[in-house]
Amino acid sequence: MLKEYEISGEKVFLIRNFVEVRIPKGHYEKLIRRHPKEYIISLAEPRRVLSHVTKRNLVFVTKESGIPLLGHAAFGLIDRGTNLIQVRPVTGCNLNCIFCSVDEGRESKTRVTDYVVEPDYLAAELAELAAFKGKGVEAHIDGQGEPLIYPYMEELLSAISEIKEIDVVSIQTNGVVLNEEKIEMLEKYVTRINLSISTLNAEKAEKLYGVRYPLEKVMENARMIAESKMDLLIAPVWVPGFNDEEMERIIQFALDIGAGKRHPPLGIQKYIPYKTGRKLKKVISFRDFYATLKKWEEEYGVKLVLNPKDFGMGKRERYPSPIRKGEVYRSRILAEGRMRGEMIAAVKGRAVTVLTNKGIGEGVKFRIIRDKDGIYLAEEL
Ligand code: SF4
């Protein structure tokens, strides 16, 4: 649970292989003569708290932090008006995919802050949202990054299992940190794993994922999930010019290992360049994409053009939003934002990303310029 070491003049405490607390060595040596280690880890200043995965500053989102769990795209909860609630406990990724829509991983040029949400806080807010939605809710654990780096996953899943409106728990993963023990743990709580595998070729994997990638291990993890009680959806991203011929190999692999016991076994995604994601030159049209999927559907006898209904998803009333585009508020900056020039404030129980250069604790006046899906962006006035 706790490791400690020294690096570059800093004393480092590594908690749950995820949170790095770094204290200047000279300062730590003075403190340790007077205080217990637990006190120093929690309260010593100056100190830096970093994600061990990305080495970026890490913000702990707790009830006491005052940061709401509705309103931000990177952490907390997202309700897009269906029976599926996106649950985002952590940001940051162990891969650096060349096609990443959120420019994640250690090489990210745009993401400067990571977040980790306290599991009881997340589960309590989820319970409230699920109660509003009613029966038949799916909790889908995903995020801007790899959800399974979350150091409190079992605590979170256990708390979610107590929420009576939730009858499906699904989780998104690139599969790299999975192993037999973790799969056994997940099997106790999770209904379906969406596993992204975009190539079965080791050389292509290094190009696509931007890091050394344990292909055999991920394939073995896929087999173990398929043999477990959980359902498995294999979700490759088709990146034109990089893995065109891999799609059919992946379809065959998914069929061979028995993915999709209750739902379709494959969810092939089209690479789409996003404004704040990684951009590649070659993009195929939706028309060609769906025409090719239809052709493969016939060849392999498997459903590839998917509909949310295939997974039991349907429309549900949205949790009411107390904030509207165009409204003006004043609030205090609570934390650093996900990208440069962004900070987080709270308004009426919602987290708002404010475009500002002000610092934590300062007051700021802003206008809401985006409110889609209950995710709020504001510009300083
Ligand atoms: S695994 Fe997903 S979040 Fe991580 S870098 Fe790749 S695309 Fe981005």
Image: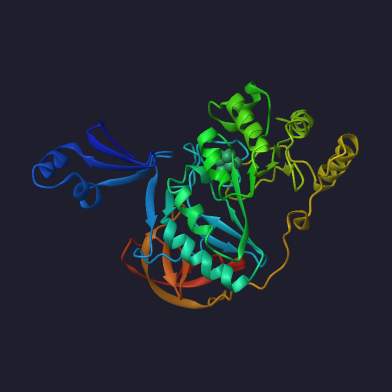
Q: Foreground residue, 345 or 213?
A: 213
The quadrant holding residue 82 is bottom right
Would residue 98 be visible to someone looking at this image?
Answer: yes
Q: Foreground residue, 171 or 323?
A: 171
Q: Foreground residue, 151 or 28?
A: 151
Q: Left or right: 71 with respect to 172?
A: left
Applied colour scheme: rainbow
Residue 361 vertical placement versus 283 (above, below): below
Q: Residue at x 55, y 44 (%)?
A: 186
Taking the image as four quarters, which one is ligand 1 found in?
A: top right
Residue 305 pos. (x, y %): 82, 47
Residue 341 vertical placement versus 28 (above, below): below
Residue 241 pos. (x, y %): 73, 31
Residue 264 vertical placement versus 10 (above, below): below
Residue 375 pos. (x, y %): 55, 65
The quadrant holding residue 235 is top right
Q: Foreground residue, 99 or 321?
A: 321
The mark tally for this picture is 0
Quadrant into which the N terminus falls: top left
Q: Residue at x 74, y 40 (%)?
A: 283
Would residue 343 be visible to someone looking at this image?
Answer: no
Quadrant into which the C terminus falls: bottom left
Residue 222 vertical placement versus 145 (above, below): above
Residue 13 pos. (x, y %): 28, 39
Q: Left or right: 28 with respect to 162?
A: left
